[in-house]
Image (tube, coloured by chain):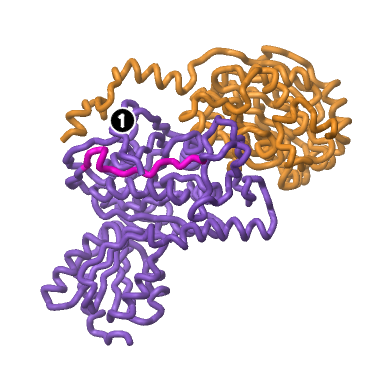
Chain colours: A orange, B purple
Amino acid sequence: MSAASNHPLNKYFREERMPHMWCSGCGIGIATNAFITALDKSGFDKNKVAVVSGIGCTGRVAGYVNTDSFHTTHGRAIPFAEGLKAVSPDTKVVVFSGDGDLMSIGGNHFIHAGRKNMDITVICVNNLNYAMTGGQVSATTPKTAITATAPYGSFCEPFNLPFLAEAAGAVYVSRWTVYHVRELQKSIGEALKKKGFSFVEIISPCPTLFERRNKMGNGLTRMKFYKENSTVENNADTKKAGIELNKPFIVGKFLDIERPTYLDAMNSYYDAALECKVGYVHYNGVKQEECFDD
Amino acid sequence: MLKADTKGVLTGIHYMDGDHATCEGALAAGCRYVAGYPITPSTEVVERYAARIPCVGGIFMQMEDEIASSIAIQGAVWGGAKAMTVTSGPGFSLMMEHIGLAVMTETPCVFVNVQRGGPSTGLPTLPAQSDMMQARWGSHGDYEIIAICPNSAQECFDLMITAFNMSERFRVPVMFMMDECVGHMTEKVVIPKADEIEVYPRAYTKKTPAEYKAYEPIKNLVPEMAPIGKGYNFHVTGLTHDEKGYPAMNEDSQKKLVSRLIDKIKNYKKEIIMIEEEYLSDADVVVMSYGITSRVSEKAMLDARALGLKVGKARLKTVWPFADEFVADISKKVKAIVVPELNAGQIVREVERAAQGRCKVISVPHLGGGVHKPEVILEAIKEGAKGERSK
């Protein structure tokens, strides 16, 4: 038996599906590893964890992790996760996907899940472009960056994801890069343990497409860039968390607050409002026996 | 089969419309999760569900759009619930991708479409049956689907239970194709006792996680589901997959999987197809209709018989898969099949295809916004009766 197959974290991976399909220098492997490590350290029973992904390079995470896992449609991992969590509250539901998936096509679901404070953890690998389809401009591509569909550079303001998450109603918001492996592990662990809508943004290179087109070097170059140009600023105002091309940016835990989750709010509200007993409910303000038992 | 859970069954004699009866049918069938987005003329289904479900013991979630609704229900199904979403034309259009996801991942669920006039925003408050082909072909790729068409409030209740049962039996999304008239028509609805209602249970695997393969066909070409959170660590993907459920993107896997998705419906059509028949044995003309149009056709057929015309009735309760063999059979015996429908002529194409020129097929289109005048259908019956019987 090889050393690799004895690795203590192996149980979290579908070994038969290795090697994975990510490019050399890509950060998704590091992000996945950080998630697995956080899961292992956090003490969750992995059989009670469900990973939901959308479509894209990061969307393939669900296929490699050895938990109940769902590889859904493009942009719709979050509403799938909401339905799953709603009827299976004992399951730790983790959405693991990319910026194109979660924030571009799926942006509406992201803000509404935040607003409702659905009890799910969203991990977003932000590589600043659509990678799987060949490096097109996404909702997070910094201005002036060249992509396949912004060949002269993007002229459009990108989303600042931590700011968006906070504004939408998330209770936990952090950002790290794939250089910050320890911080990332710790942060994902905190997010997993947080009750409510927790959000971790992971800045990652896409050397094959984004870095190449923008002459930003390879994976290693970017690791050095992250090390030298990111400043840890915990509790920072998320308005300051925007990302500009090749400019310094902030990382850290930006938000950690308490707010009732959707399901807790629903249950406590109905407990109070309905004095619930089977067969007795209000319908448009009319009691059931008047409305339903005609 | 199990007996229905008493908590969801509002036993008694009621006076309610089709939308409300649909909701009660879903509750009786064991539907404990609905995600939806308001849209006329379907909204009353979810309004009633939202009111009823807290004390029955389930969840209604109003989502941000129909795209979210149509996949939230699939998350709920994998989480262990029976689930449905409810919509009308524009919302149905938004749900198409997720009908394909449910087909590909074999997620049992129900999509209710209370049809209104289209295209686009069309006629929000007025009836049509113009989404019938969309229900069959709307999502990309090859697949078979089940679509059921009730024609009364009572059938909205009864067939809703059938829809849920079929979705579990075949592991396929079932389209429940109502129309504005059926949805808003208030009639007597008898809801039986819970122990008189048969419910198809979610058939979870008895295998151990080590033995289990998520997409290995076990019985009738259908694989078994595994419960979440029990160590099965199963994978579900919309990609073409192998029996383990892992992506397998090649010609052979595609052929194997897609053939099975088609055959698990096509080879078991006899279990699925429901047709109400009357006076077929000596009919010269058969009126083939579905949904609200079948109610208008009743009057036309009565009038035709009063004139001495031999008219038979074939009402499609199941529209998809299409009753090819049934139509082929009657096409050998009659002069004509008359097909009135609230669209420019959708199901008539299927009738023509199955009849293969053996008898006349007379389309009676109506573009929606109202229903046919019985006289228009009567004229078509008279025209059909003039011809010669096929050989």
Q: Residue at x 34, y 43 (%)?
A: B199
State the SS at label 1.
Answer: helix
Residue A7 within the magenta-colored segment of the rendering: no
Q: Residue at x 28, y 79 (%)?
A: B334
The part of the image, by quadrant, that contains residue B13 is: top left
Spot occupied by residue A252 in the image (x, y as percentages of width and height) = 72, 17
Spot occupied by residue B204 in the image (x, y as percentages of width and height) = 49, 40
Residue B203 within the magenta-colored segment of the rendering: yes
Spot occupied by residue B151 in the image (x, y as percentages of width and height) = 26, 55
Q: Is residue A105 visible?
A: no
Q: Residue at x 40, y 51 (%)?
A: B175
Residue B355 appears left or right of A240:
left
Nearer to us in this view, A247 or A26? A26
Spot occupied by residue A121 in the image (x, y as percentages of width and height) = 60, 25
In the rendered view, tell whether residue B201 sits above or below residue A190: below
Badge 1 amino acid: Ala
Residue B161 appears left or right of A262:
left
Residue A103 appears left or right of A128:
left
Q: Quadrant of the C terminus of chain B?
A: bottom left
Magenta residues span B191-205
Label 1 belongs to which residue?
B51
